[in-house]
Amino acid sequence: MGKKLIVIGGGAGGYSAAVKAAHLGAEVILAEAANIGGTCLNIGCVPTKSLLYTAGFYRSALNNAVPGVKITGVELDWAAAQSAKETAVKRLTNGVNVLLRSRGVTIINEKATPLSGQSVRIGAEIHKADAVILAVGSVNSPLTFQGAGLPCVIDSTIALSLEHVPESMVIVGGGVIGVELAALYSSLGTKITIIELTSSLLPQMDADISEYIQAALEANGVCVHTNARLIHAKQTHDNNTISFFKDGKTLSTSASTVLVAAGRRPNTDSLNLEDIGVKMTCGAIDTDEYFRTNIPGLYAVGDCNGKTMLAHAAMAQGETAAEHIMNVKTSINNRIIPACVYTSPEIACVGLTENQAIASGTEVSVGLFDLRGNSRAVIEGSGGFVKIIADKKLGEVLGVHIAGPYATELIAEAALCMSIEGTVEDIVNTVHAHPTVGESMRETAMTLFRE
C-alpha cells in the first residue's frame, strides 16, 4: 500500500513536492487557499519578468539601440503590457494545474493548518497522512514608519499591477526586488530614487556586482542613496515628501509613489506552529538536510524555512523532501544554488563571493574578464564582466559572478561545474562556441589556469 502525503501550499515548493511524490506512487492532497503557483507565478517572478521584457524592448526602441534600425513614433501601451503579463501568468498557472491533476494529485482550495506530522485541518475537515509538507512561502516584510498607511505607499505586489506608470517613485530597499523594479520603471520613464539602509545595493552579492549594478542604474537616471534610513513620508498638495537620514543629515525628496521593497519573510504567522511544538528561528521553520522539522513526519520547504528564498530552491527542496518521504535516496547541495537579477544588464551568481571565500580561510585566485573583449557582447553593444573565484591550490571553482547579457542563462554552466567539483582547468578544456557570450566563461578561466 502506498503512502499518503498532504502538501500545504501550492507554490513552487508545494507543487514540485506534490508532483514528485505522486510520480513515486504516493496518494497526494495539495491544499492551497489562494492560487496554484504561489508568489512566483502569480505576483512575483513571472509577472515581473514579463513587464521587464516589455520595458527593455521599449527602452531599446526608444533609444534606437540596434545599429542600422531607425524606429520612430515609439509609444508605450501599458494596458497591453499588463494584459500580456496576465496572459502569461494564466497560461503557466493553468499548466501547473493540469500537471498536478494529470499526476492524480487532489487539489483542495481551502486554508490548511497542520495539527501534527500526520494530520491536517483543511477547511472544516481533518485529514490523515503519513507525512505533511509545509510549503507556505513568504510575504512582503512590513516596514513601520510615519506615513506607511498613505495611499501613495505600495508594496511589490501592487507595483506589478499599477493602472498607470508613475511619474516618480521612491523605492525603499535596494535588494533584488527593489533593484528589479527600479530597472523596470526607470526604463519606462519613471524618475526613480532608491533608499538603501546598507552600504551597497544587492548587499548579499559580490562587491563587484553591487558596484556594477549601481553604476548601470545611475547611468539610466536612477538616484541611489546607500547608508540611508527612511524617516517618514508625508502627503502634500500635489506630491509626496519622503525624508531620510544619511551622513548625519536629514534629507528629503519628492515622488508620486513610494514602493516599500524591504524584502520578504516566512509566511508562518497564521499557522500556530508553536502550539504543536515546531521549532522556529525568527519566524522561519528549522529543518535538517532533508527539510524535516523537529515534529516527526512534518517537513517544511521553500521560503517558509528561510534557507534560500528563491523559487528554484523551493522546487529542489520540495522534490528532496518528497523523495525522502518515499524512501528514495536524495540530497541537495545548498551551497550551489544560483541567484539571478533580471536588470539590464542581467546579474547571476552562484557559490561564494570573493569576501566569503577569503573569510573561509582558503587561499583563492580571482579571475575577471571584461565583456567589452567578447565578440558577441561587442556586436550587441553590451558590457559587463565574468568573475570566477577558485581555490588557488586545487583550481576548484568556488564562486562565479556574472553581469552582462544572458547572465541568467550562463550561470547554469557555472552551477554544473561546481556541482561536480570542477576546476578552472575543466572550463578551459571545454570548447565553447564562438561567437557567444558563453565563451567568456572560458576566457575568465584562462586568466586563472596556470596563471
Image (cartoon, rainbow, N blue to C red):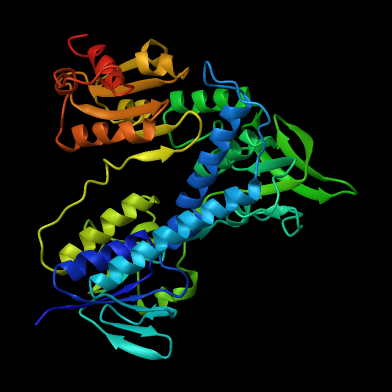
- Residue at 71% of width from left, 53% of height from top? 153
The x and y percentages for residue 96 are 34, 63
Front-most of residues 322 and 346: 346
183 relative to 243 in the view: left or right: left
- Residue at 24% of width from left, 21% of height from top? 363
433 relative to 425 in the view: left or right: right
The x and y percentages for residue 67 are 52, 16
Q: Quadrant of the N terminus?
A: bottom left
The x and y percentages for residue 84 are 53, 51
Q: Is residue 239 above or below residue 219?
A: below
Q: Is residue 96 above or below residue 229?
A: below
Front-most of residues 387 and 429: 429
The x and y percentages for residue 92 are 40, 58
Q: Given the current orientation, which residue lies at the most extreme right position?
A: 237
- Residue at 55% of width from left, 38% of height from top? 179
Using the rendered image of the protein, determine whether residue 281 is visible from the camera's viewpoint.
Answer: no
Q: Is residue 328 above or below residue 433?
A: below
Using the rendered image of the protein, determine whether residue 335 is visible from the camera's viewpoint.
Answer: yes
Q: Toward which corner of the image does residue 155 lie, by quadrant?
A: bottom right
Q: How many marks?
A: 0
Q: Toward which corner of the image does residue 355 lie, by quadrant?
A: top left
48 relative to 275 in the view: left or right: right
51 relative to 300 in the view: left or right: right
- Residue at 29% of width from left, 31% of height from top? 360
Q: Quadrant of the C terminus?
A: top left
